[in-house]
Image: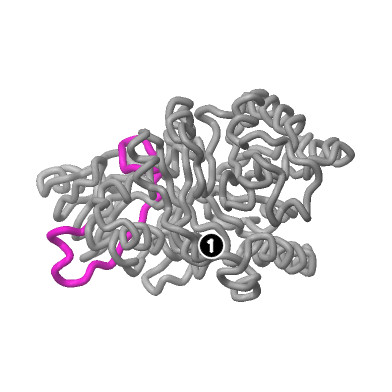
Amino acid sequence: MSARLLSAGALLTQGARAYRGGGLLLEGGRVRRVLTSAAALRRAAREARTRVDLGEGLLTTGLVNAHAHLELSGLAGALPRGADFAAWVRALMAARAARSPRQLARDVRRGAQRCLDTGTTWVGDIDTCGRTLAGLSRHPLRVRVHRELIDAWDPSRTAAALARVARALPRRAGRLEGLAPHAPFTVSERLLEAVAGLSRARAAQVTMHWSESEAEVDWMVRGSGPLAGLLGASPRTPGLDLLERAGLLGPRLSLVHGNHPRRGEPARIAAAGATLVHCPGSHRWFEREPFPLATYRRAGVQLALGTDSLASNDDLDLAREMALVREAHPALGPEEVWDWATRGGARALGVGDRAGRLAAGRPADLVLWDLRAGDERAPLEALTRAAARVRGVWIGGRRVVDERGAGRG
């Protein structure tokens, strides 16, 4: 194998520290050495077979989108913004059912390319229709494919839901299996217990929508509200209690949204080592009440960021999500938000050993960001305040997005 040297105007390393004139020595698709000084660059140049000077710009690890629905990328602008949640669910189901399998596969690829073009190299995708793998055939984006399970608390549907995921996905580089019981109000306790068993047997990550709307909480606890017209008898039990009872509440679980936690629930999530995924763009799209971020931070909950889907967001750009969360919570510092979009997402997807930071031995999944004049002094502040233009993306050391932002994958 031959080593290759990449140098850039600035390099963002572990701990979100920026070094002027840094670089990376790559070999075999991985980072062999992180170079943070001119002297280190000179020494590495003697070892490298080729050297690429990327010019001005900030070279970082790739972003990790902890929650997306790539198959819904064809529904941009198709659903009512800020609508009642139950009405939105009905509209979504009808719109998705109208898409053919071929259209859904194209939608997956379209969404994947938008993620890649905006600096995301890993995505946690929810696969409801079974088209994610077809849509990502030969696409370079790295994905944890969470296969969705729903039985709507109907015992006659439980076996069919389990049959859909009975066979594990084939193992491939850049494609990992995950499980996605949809939400406590659509997944029975029996199905949750079965998912917990599958997760243990396959060492698979689990992700689940949780406490997204007041309608969900009303139906779960009291059997009332707009969802009562869509579902049968309520368990009259908080969703987190059911997850804990089924054996799902632990480090392999990520909970998405969490807009309406009950007293004590954030502390339980933190103690279990689960991750809470916030989707700022979707939160704004639905015109929801302020996200209880301070409650989760005080409890010590691990946080990550996601985009959700183009059926409930304006973009799949995770850098935009960083800017939106800082706009909504001005006291947040750039280092914390960057951590959610990188290491936090890697924890949520169970890929913390291969994503989320630049380090020797890690895959060379990289992004080169274009910074405006004056941003060099505080690059992370600029990057998390406004979505910067992407000048290049590398997966496993191979450039897959060029200077114009046009994907090559």
Q: Which residue is drawn at 43% across and 53% down?
A: 291
Local SS, label 1: loop
Q: Quadrant of residue 98?
A: bottom right
Q: Can residue 35 be seen in this view?
A: yes
List x then y, in percent, for residue 41.
17, 48
Asked if residue 332 lies left or right of residue 62, the reply is left
Q: Residue at x 70, y 28 (%)?
A: 198
Q: Residues within 10 Å of mark 1 (few under 14, many from 20)?
A: some
List x then y, in percent, for residue 355.
41, 42
- Name the one closer to the observer, 275 or 370: 275
Q: In the image, is residue 364 part of the stretch drawn in magenta?
A: yes
Which residue has dot 1 on it? Answer: 409
- Name the one closer to the observer, 289 or 270: 289
- Name the one closer to the observer, 205 or 60: 205
Magenta span main SS: loop
The span shown in magenta is: 356-379
Task: Tell me the amino acid under the disc marked 1.
Answer: Gly
Q: Which residue is drawn at 29% across and 46% down?
A: 336
List x then y, in percent, for residue 78.
65, 75
Q: In the image, is residue 196 part of the stretch drawn in magenta?
A: no
- Name the one closer to the observer, 200 or 211: 211
Q: Is residue 147 visible?
A: no
Which quadrant: the N terminus?
top left
Asked if residue 190 lies left or right of residue 58, the reply is right
Q: Quadrant of residue 195?
A: top right
Q: Which residue is drawn at 65% across and 56% down?
A: 137
